[in-house]
């Protein structure tokens, strides 16, 4: 994390308070700092001393077992992986900051350690399945008018723009299989046949509107089409106003493009990456963007 992330997650965005606490944690050797260039933000990590303290005091007893060497390797990831993980934390911090202002919705859980929520789906022709490691898992609690409490479950994928469109769509298809097979229902204490009682959404954050729109088209051309499971937006929107009307489902894209030159056609034999500046301008003007949830609804 960066100091900005820590302030948003643990100090209600009060950066001066976060700064003072971090100075104390650094002084006792619990927090270290990655080497960086002058123009880069400070990237902080827990040290071996902090890990030993947490483990010795039982704070990690409910988590998967992790050795010291495995723990320390997390602080030495590549720059490419680090950049991706910081983008995930940007989204997480934005959610926490936005939801802190709500009297109806609150963060019950926002996990970014895949080992805690990864899942396996079947694979045709193979005895073993495919392991899916989402970038995040989110549970949001909503206070009902009658005093009750409801819950919204979401998986998070922050697209690196390094996957092919085929690989990206295959990944989202596995979420659909996880839902329909009852895997998510079973994980949450239900039964496979009652999977509809355990819905979730997959939030996918893209670096550009162009890649978002290409993904929306491909999800519509998938067999079966994925219409409402996936909610798409851009990184700029997700980190600025994650609760606002910034999310597009493939279904919304289809409705906006119907009867226009940008209407998704059947998939071509050779799919090329689509660059259509006119399409991007049209979609931004015409598509209906949604809020994840609205106060009072």
Image (tube, helix red, strand yellow):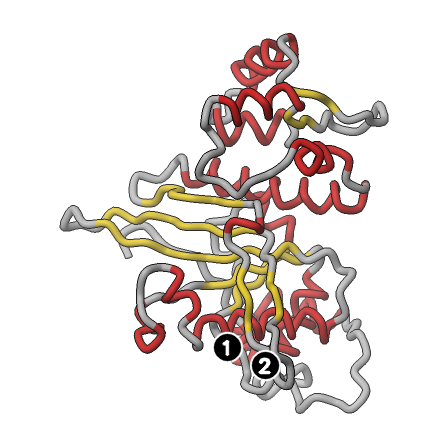
Residue 122 x %, y %? 56, 76
Q: How many marks?
A: 2
Badge 2 crowding class, 10 Å Cα cut-off, few under 14, some 14 to 19, many 20 or more, is many
Q: Residue at x 60, y 26 (%)?
A: 51
124 or 18, which is in the foreground?
124
Relative to 88, residue 40 above or below? above
Q: Residue at x 81, y 41 (%)?
A: 79
Residue 153 in picture, x, y percent from top left: 41, 57
Q: Residue at point 37% right, 66% down?
A: 185
Count neighbours of disc 1 (C-alpha within 10 A) and say few if under 14, some if 14 to 19, many if 20 or more: some
Above/below status of 200 relative to 112? below
Q: Residue at x 57, y 45 (%)?
A: 113
Residue situated in front as seen by the camera: 262 or 128: 128
Answer with left or right where residue 99 lies relative to residue 234.
Answer: left
Residue 33, numbered circle = none
Helix, strand or loop status at disc 1: loop
- Residue nearest the viewer, comparing 123 with 40: 123
The quadrant of the image that shows the N terminus is top right
Q: Position of residue 35 (x, y in %)?
A: 82, 25
Task: Please give the residue where the numbered disc 1 appears in the rendered image.
Answer: 227
Q: Are marks 2 and 1 in contact (CB under 8 Å)?
A: yes
- 3, above or below 283, in the image: above
Residue 220 is tagged as 2
| Secondary element at tag 2 | helix
Q: CA distance from mark 2 to mark 1?
A: 7 Å
Q: Is residue 146 above or below residue 164?
A: above
In the image, taking residue 288 as reference, residue 105 lies left or right, namely left
Residue 138 relative to residue 125: left or right: left
Q: Position of residue 252 (x, y in %)?
A: 51, 74
Which label's residue is closer to the chain start, 2 or 1? 2
**In the rendered image, which quarter contains the C terminus?**
bottom left
The front one of 40 and 67 is 67
């Amino acid at each position: 994390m960066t100091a900005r992330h820590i302030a948003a997650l643990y100090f209600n965005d009060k950066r001066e308070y976060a700064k003072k606490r971090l100075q104390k944690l650094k002084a006792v050797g619990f927090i270290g700092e990655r080497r960086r260039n002058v123009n880069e933000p400070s990237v902080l990590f827990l040290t071996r001393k902090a890990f030993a303290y947490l483990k010795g005091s039982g704070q990690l007893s409910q988590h998967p077992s992790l050795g010291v060497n495995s723990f320390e390797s997390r602080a030495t990831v590549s720059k490419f992986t680090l950049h991706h993980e910081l983008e995930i934390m940007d989204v997480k911090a934005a959610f926490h900051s936005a939801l802190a202002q709500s009297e109806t919705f609150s963060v019950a859980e926002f996990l970014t350690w895949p080992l805690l929520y990864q899942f396996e789906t079947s694979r045709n022709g193979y005895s073993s399945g495919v392991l899916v490691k989402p970038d995040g898992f989110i549970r949001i609690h909503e206070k009902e008018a009658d005093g009750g409490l409801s819950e919204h479950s979401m998986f998070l994928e922050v697209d690196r723009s390094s996957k092919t469109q085929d690989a990206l769509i295959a990944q989202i298809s596995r979420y659909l299989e996880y839902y329909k097979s009852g895997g998510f229902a079973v994980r949450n204490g239900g039964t496979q046949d009652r999977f509809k009682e355990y819905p979730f959404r997959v939030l996918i954050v893209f670096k550009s509107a162009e890649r978002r729109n290409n993904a929306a088209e491909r999800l519509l051309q998938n067999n079966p089409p994925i219409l409402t499971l996936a909610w798409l937006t851009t990184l700029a929107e997700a980190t600025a106003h994650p609760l606002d009307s910034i999310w597009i489902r493939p279904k919304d894209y289809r409705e906006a493009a119907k009867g226009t030159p940008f209407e998704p056609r059947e998939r071509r034999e050779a799919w090329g990456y689509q660059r259509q500046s006119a399409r991007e301008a049209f979609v931004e003007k015409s598509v209906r963007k949604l809020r994840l949830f609205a106060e009072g609804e």
